[in-house]
Image (cartoon, rainbow, N blue to C red):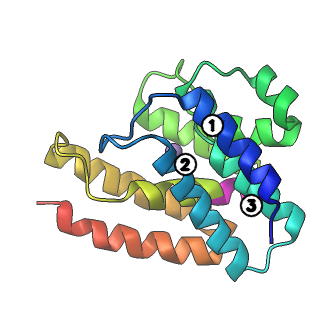
Amino acid sequence: MFSQEKYLKALNYAARVHDEQKTPQGLPYLTHLTSVAMEMIHACEEGNVKLEDADFAITVALLHDVLEDTDVTIGELIEEFGEEVASGVEALSKDPTIESKKQQMADSINRLLTQNYAVQSVKLADRISNLQKPPQDWDNEKIYNYFQESKFILSCLKNANPFLSKRLEDKINNYRIYIK
Ligand SMILES: [Mn+2]
C-alpha cells in the first residue's frame, strides 16, 4: 500500500533532526510523528488512496514539524525530498514572524487551503494526535482555547478527508471531559 523504503527515509531523517526533542508529555518526539503517520496510513487504507499519493501523504506526515521545530531549512528539504513535499511541510508550519498564536494558525490554514487534500489531511491527523490528555501544566483556559482551535481547524479542513474529519470530530467531543 505504500513504500517501506520511502517511509524509512522520512522516519530516519525526522529522527535525526528532531534529535532529543520531546512531546509536551515528555515522550520522544518520534511518538508524535509516527502517530500522525499512523493516522494517515489508516486514512489511506480506508479511502483506497493511490500508492503514489499515500507515499506523499505519509512522507509529509513524518516530516510535518521539521521546519517549525528544527534547524532544517526549506532548501535542505527540497534537496532531500523534492519541491512538493517541502511546500506541503511549509504550509503545515506556523510563521514565527506573525505575533499572535491565533493569527499564526489562521495564516497556516489559509496556506493549507491552497494545498492538495493530502497535505490538508496531515493537519487533521496532527490535531487528532495532539488531542490526547492535556499536559499537566496546562490551565483550564489553555485547554479550552485548544478545544476551540481544534473546532476551527476541523471547520476549515473538513473536506480534505471524510474519514479523518469524522475521527477528529470524535476526538474533539471526547476532549470536552478535560474542560472544567
Ligand atoms: Mn505536529
Residue drawn 20% across the image and 42% down it? 138
Q: Is mark 3 within 8 Å of ligand 1?
A: no
- Mark 1 / mark 3, whichever is N-terminal: 1
Q: Is residue 158 visible?
A: yes
Residue at mark 1 to residue at mark 2: CA–CA distance: 8 Å
Q: What's the residue type where badge 2 is placed?
A: Leu
- Residue at which label 3 appears: 117
Q: Earlier in the sequence, mark 1 or mark 2?
A: 1
Which marked residue is nearer to the observer: mark 3 or mark 2?
Answer: 2
Q: Is residue 46 above or below residue 61?
A: below
Q: Nearer the viewer, mark 1 or mark 3?
A: 1
User: Which amino acid type is marked by label 1?
Assistant: Ala
Graded by Cα atoms within 10 Å as few (under 14), some (14 to 19) or many (20 or more), the crowding at tag 3 reads some
Q: How far apart in space, not on screen, are marks 1 and 3 (Cα)? A: 22 Å
Tell me: is circle 2 under 8 Å from ligand 1.
Answer: yes
Segment tinted magenta in the rendering: 116-121
Decide: marks 1, 2 in contact (CB < 8 A)?
yes
**Residue 94: quadrant of the picture:** top right
Residue 90 belongs to the span the image colors magenta: no
Numbered label attached to residue 14: 1
Q: Left or right: where does residue 65 sit relative to residue 147?
A: right
Marks 3 and 2, Cα distance to the nearest angstrom? Answer: 19 Å
Question: Which label belongs to residue 33?
Answer: 2
Q: What's the amino acid at mark 3?
A: Tyr
